[in-house]
């Protein structure tokens, strides 16, 4: 009988996670490390990246904190260079970094639009392209995981035009790259969560408490996602357990998009 227990193992693999200083990125970085991957912990907040790396080290894992503004090509290249210098390769990319900046569409400023598009879409593209180049040159394949959202698939509350456009772009980019890079055995997938208990959502609920009821009314499971809920899907997509999965949008949304 074939031994299936190792399908989810990330032993011997090296990964890079953006936005890994907090929220979903932090959980994904820590989860991948617990499954055996060496992880480059990338965040614009270097202190936060260091704290995530410290947690990984305390658990017996290997991590390298790196400061990077994901919108800047030179910083993206340098971050990847640092990771490759330390680990010698990258088998996994999780492009998780993202922000929100809400305003009704008719009031949204160009600055708000550009800022969210730059981080949530441009930043994903820059890391996909640079890590993709490395994976192609190395010739060993790899797994790229992009952070989508239900906002890229359905209309959410007022004020999300920039965020929805960026996440819709991420989903389209993911599918395109999956087809384009399949010849190199590079799998490209997206995780699309509903509202999770992250600093971004907590701050929103604190400023507008009524939004919590709206969120829960639209999530059939009746609760916000917790950080631990994202780890399994990310490890699955990073591991050999998903070796026949590419171009997929894995909705981790409590049933939100099943309506």
Image: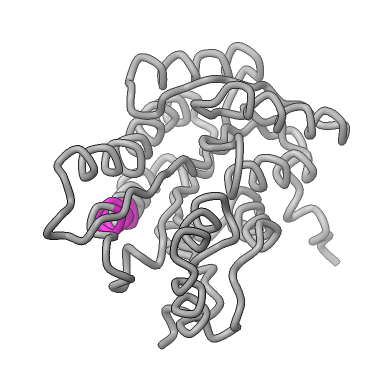
**Residue found 50% across the figure and 79% down from its top:** 213
- Indicate the position of residue 61 as horizontal and vertical percent values: 81, 31
Tell which of 110 and 221 is nearer to you: 110
Tell which of 154 and 90 is nearer to you: 154
Within the image, what quadrant is residue 3 found in? bottom right
- Indicate the position of residue 138 as horizontal and vertical percent values: 50, 25
Taking 63 as reference, is 96 left or right?
left
Taking 8 as reference, is 100 left or right?
left
Q: Does the magenta stretch include residue 169?
A: yes
Within the image, what quadrant is residue 84 found in? top right
Q: Does the magenta stretch include residue 90?
A: no
Within the image, what quadrant is residue 198 found in? bottom right
Which residues, given as a range, are shown in magenta?
163-171
Render colour scheme: one colour
Image: 153 above or below 42: below
Tell which of 73 and 184 is nearer to you: 73
Image: 235 above or below 39: below
Quarter of the image with the C terminus in it = bottom left
- Indicate the position of residue 155 as horizontal and vertical percent values: 28, 73
Q: Residue 153: tell me if it is visible.
A: yes
**Residue found 35% across the figure and 37% down from its top:** 119
Image: 126 above or below 87: below
**Residue found 45% across the figure and 56% down from its top:** 190
**Residue found 44% across the figure and 84% down from its top:** 258
- Indicate the position of residue 32 as horizontal and vertical percent values: 70, 43
Magenta span dominant secondary structure: helix
């Amino acid at each position: 009988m074939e031994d299936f227990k190792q399908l989810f193992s990330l032993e011997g693999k090296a990964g890079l996670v953006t936005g890994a200083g907090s929220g979903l990125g932090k959980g994904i970085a820590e989860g991948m490390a617990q499954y055996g991957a060496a992880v480059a912990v990338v965040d614009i907040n270097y202190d936060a990246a260091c704290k995530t790396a410290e947690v990984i080290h305390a658990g017996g894992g290997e991590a390298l904190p790196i400061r990077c503004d994901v919108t800047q090509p030179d910083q993206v290249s340098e971050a990847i260079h640092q990771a490759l210098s330390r680990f010698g390769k990258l088998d996994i990319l999780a492009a998780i970094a993202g922000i929100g900046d809400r305003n009704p569409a008719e009031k949204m400023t160009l600055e708000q639009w550009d800022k969210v598009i730059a981080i949530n879409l441009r930043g994903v593209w820059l890391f996909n392209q640079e890590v993709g180049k490395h994976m192609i040159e190395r010739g060993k394949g790899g797994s790229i995981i992009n952070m989508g959202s239900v906002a890229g698939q359905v209309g959410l509350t007022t004020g999300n035009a920039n965020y929805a456009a960026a996440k819709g772009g991420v989903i389209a980019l993911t599918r395109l790259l999956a087809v384009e890079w399949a010849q190199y055995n590079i799998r490209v997938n997206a995780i699309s969560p509903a509202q999770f208990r992250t600093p971004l959502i907590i701050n929103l609920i604190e400023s507008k408490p009524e939004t919590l009821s709206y969120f829960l009314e639209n999530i059939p499971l009746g609760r916000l996602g917790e950080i631990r809920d994202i780890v399994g899907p990310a490890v699955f997509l990073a591991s050999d357990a998903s070796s026949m999965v590419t171009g997929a949008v894995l909705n981790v949304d409590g049933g939100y998009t099943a309506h």
